Image: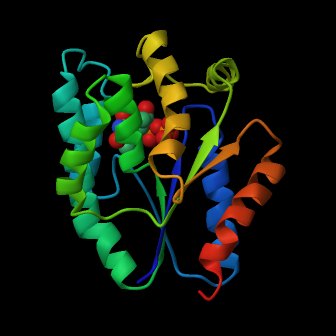
Amino acid sequence: MGLFISMEGPDGSGKTMQMDMLEQDLRQRGLDVLRSREPGGTAISEKIRDMLLDPANTEMSSRTEALLYAASRAQHVEQVLKPALDGGKIVLCDRYVDSSLVYQGIGRGLGIPAIEEINAFATGGLQPDVTIVLQIDFEEGLRRKGRQNGSLDRMEAQKEDFLRRIHDGFTHLKDLDPDRVFLIDGANPPDEVFREIQNVLKPFLTGL
Ligand code: TYD
């Protein structure tokens, strides 16, 4: 069995940059890495992603949204994640079930238990070995996001109170699974953030 690492955090937390640094670091150590993202990672999951993020889909209900994220994940687990882990790879995944707990469970108010249940079905119970949650002050996250060019997708275009609930929700993940989830301050300079990530991962990587 390989090692399943997931990375979580709100918009503007620096998640993509840290994923890039981590992927490069693991590959330089000669480890066999599979990097993927959710929603996405397979042709079917990417089609579901397009539906989820299309700003034109303003009428999508919260339950539909939660089920589509779970459906995209089910395909991803079966077609990509499980085979990679069974093949002994290190899987590095940008978002996973925890994003659904936060965005749909807390943000949409569907509740943690309902989201856990549909995702247990979708994933067959596959959980990350370790999850890094990058945290960033809400206003700082918005400022960083504002500096990026491009139009907003359907989730980014949500009202501020939703985005605030998401932001606070990420901190809650640690309470739900303290042994698996590690909160890291994304406000520090990128090199410092990366050193902290390396420290968290060290015990998981020894012997690989
Ligand atoms: P993406 O562009 O991948 O966002 P980011 O670069 O911030 O990771 O878009 C994914 C969006 O979908 C993001 O706003 C978070 C949201 N999301 C959910 O609401 N539920 C989920 O289960 C997942 C995986 C993502």
Ligand 1 occupies quarter: top left
Whether residue 176 is visible, yes or no, is yes
Nearer to us in this view, 113 or 16: 113
The residue located at (59%, 82%) in the rendering is 31
Q: The C terminus is located in which quarter?
A: bottom right
The image shows residue 58, relative to residue 71, as above or below, that is above
Rendered location of residue 12, percent (x, y): 62, 32
Q: Name the residue located 37 percent from the left edge and 28 percent from the top edge.
A: 106
Q: In the image, is 126 to the left or to the right of 14?
A: left
Residue at screen point 26% across, 39% down: 113
Residue at the location (76% across, 56% down)? 196
Residue 47 at least partly seen: no
Rendering coords of residue 90 (x, y %): 50, 75
Q: Is residue 6 left or right of residue 194?
A: left
Q: Is residue 134 above or below residue 51?
A: below
Q: Position of residue 161 (x, y in %)?
A: 46, 11
The answer to which of 118 and 75 lies nearer the viewer is 118
Colouring scheme, one of rainbow, by chain, secondary structure, one colour = rainbow
In front of the other: 172 or 102: 172
Quick check: 78 left or right of 96? left
Image position of 33 with respect to 93: above or below:
below
**Compared to 63, does 174 lie above or below?**
below
Percent x, y of residue 64:
16, 30
Total of numbered circles in the picture?
0
Foreground pick, 147 / 94: 94
Q: Looking at the figure, which quarter contains the N terminus?
A: bottom left
Q: In which quarter of the image is residue 207?
A: bottom right
